[in-house]
Amino acid sequence: MKIISKVYDILGDDGKFIRQKVFCEEQGFVNEFDEIDKTAKAAWHLVLYDNTRPAATARLICKNQKEGRYIIGRVAVLMEYRKLHLGSRLVEELEGIAVANGATVLEVSAQCRAKAFYEKCGFAAQGSTYEDEGCPHIKMVKKLV
């Protein structure tokens, strides 16, 4: 298996396919896609491929460039690729893009069941849990400087 990564400035079919499978079909989310996905250069959309087969995706948004605040979100790995550390690779690659663009802080709205994963990636929980489409989430932050 050879994993390659590609960054897009709009959500393409491969990223949509992964997010549809993971968030809609597996987890039952309805409001998965938004304007950020449709707007060119509103985010960096990272897709990891097993050769040419899409395996994982995530996106990076600049929340406030002046403050250096960026958001990683929509981290999704197809079921057959889990436990291969692709989620960590997504976060690491997007963190690199964020730093190259002046980021000092990364945020993520994490599903509570993924809290330990983000802690391993250097994020810390902040505030109380909240619901997003019936799924408990928590804001997590990583300071880069």
Image (cartoon, rainbow, N blue to C red):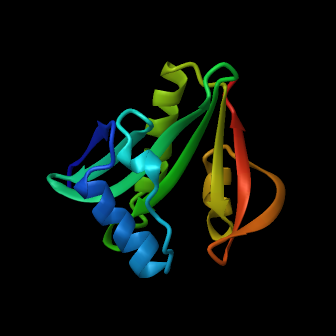
Image vertical order of residue 136 relative to residue 75, above or below: below
Where residue 50 sits in the image (x, y, percent)?
Answer: 21, 55
Q: Residue at x 14, y 53 (%)?
A: 52
Q: Say which of 40 and 106 sits in front.
A: 40
Image vertical order of residue 47 relative to residue 103, above or below: below
**Left or right, 91 with reference to 49:** right
Classify the position of the C terminus by image quarter: top right
| Rendering quarter of residue 13 | bottom left
**Left or right, 81 with reference to 99:** left
Image vertical order of residue 89 relative to residue 14, above or below: above
Residue most extreme to the right: 127
Q: Residue at x 73, y 53 (%)?
A: 139
Q: Residue at x 39, y 80 (%)?
A: 25
Q: Is residue 45 visible?
A: yes
Where residue 63 sits in the image (x, y, percent)?
Answer: 61, 34
**Left or right, 132 with reference to 101:** right
Where residue 129 sits in the image (x, y, percent)?
Answer: 79, 65
Total numbered labels placed on residues in the image: 0
Q: Say which of 100 and 134 sits in front.
A: 134
| Rendering quarter of residue 15 | bottom left
Q: Is residue 78 visible?
A: no
Where residue 96 sits in the image (x, y, percent)?
Answer: 48, 29
**Left or right, 101 with reference to 134:** left
Classify the position of the N terminus by image quarter: bottom left
| Rendering quarter of residue 130 | bottom right
